[in-house]
Image (cartoon, rainbow, N blue to C red):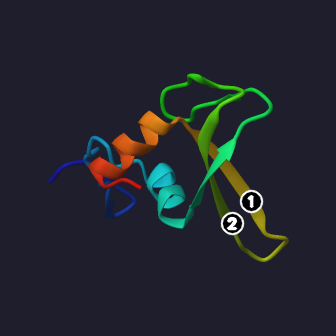
């Protein structure tokens, strides 16, 4: 009956490609704005530089028992368009 530990079945979930919870949760909460990048930034998906040109800045707010935390990701225009077409954003 598989692996049993302390009377409970140890279940290992099967990984599903493209279903990274942390990334998907960010994209569900993020508010995107086309912004000019004065300082060098890296695209979160492709790791390309965004510098002295426009890119999409996504901001998500995480709340909990303490102060809210703001998480910021930058995307190039191309990666943002691909994300919209794939339905991730």
Residue at 70% across, 26% down: 51
Tell me where residue 12 appears, x and y as whole percent. 31, 49
N-terminal of the two: label 1 or label 2?
2
- In this rendering, is residue 56 above or below 54? below
Tell me where residue 14 appears, x and y as whole percent. 25, 47
Residue at 49% across, 60% down: 25
The Cα atoms of the two marked residues, 1 and 2, are separated by 5 Å
> Which residue is the extreme one toward the top?
48
Tell me where residue 17 appears, x and y as whole percent. 27, 41
19 vs 45, nearest the viewer: 45
> Which residue is the extreme one toward the bottom?
65
Snapshot quadrant of residue 37:
top right
Q: How many marks?
A: 2
Would residue 12 be seen by someone viewing this image from the given angle? no
Estimate how packed mark 2 is, as few (under 14), some (14 to 19) or many (20 or more) residues with alpha carbons within 10 Å.
few
Residue at 49% across, 57% down: 27
Secondary structure under the numbered disc 1 in the rendered image: strand
Marker disc for residue 5: none
Q: Which residue is mark 1?
A: 70
Q: Is residue 36 left or right of residue 3?
A: right
- In this rendering, is residue 34 above or below 49? below
Tell me where residue 69 appears, x and y as whole percent. 77, 62
Residue at 29% across, 44% down: 15
If the image is split into quadrants, where does the N terminus sit?
bottom left
The answer to whether the residue labelled 1 contacts the one labelled 2, judged by CB atoms less than 8 Å apart, is yes
If the image is split into quadrants, where does the C terminus sit?
bottom left
Q: Which residue is mark 2?
A: 61
Secondary structure under the numbered disc 2 in the rendered image: strand
């Amino acid at each position: 009956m598989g692996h049993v530990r302390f009377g409970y079945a140890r279940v290992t979930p099967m990984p599903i490609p493209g279903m990274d919870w942390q990334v998907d949760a960010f994209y569900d909460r993020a508010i995107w704005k086309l912004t000019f990048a004065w300082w060098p930034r890296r695209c979160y998906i492709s790791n390309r530089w965004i510098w002295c040109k426009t890119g999409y800045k996504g901001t998500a707010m995480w709340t909990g028992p303490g102060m809210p935390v703001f998480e910021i990701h930058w995307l190039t225009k191309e990666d943002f368009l691909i994300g919209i077409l794939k339905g991730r954003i």
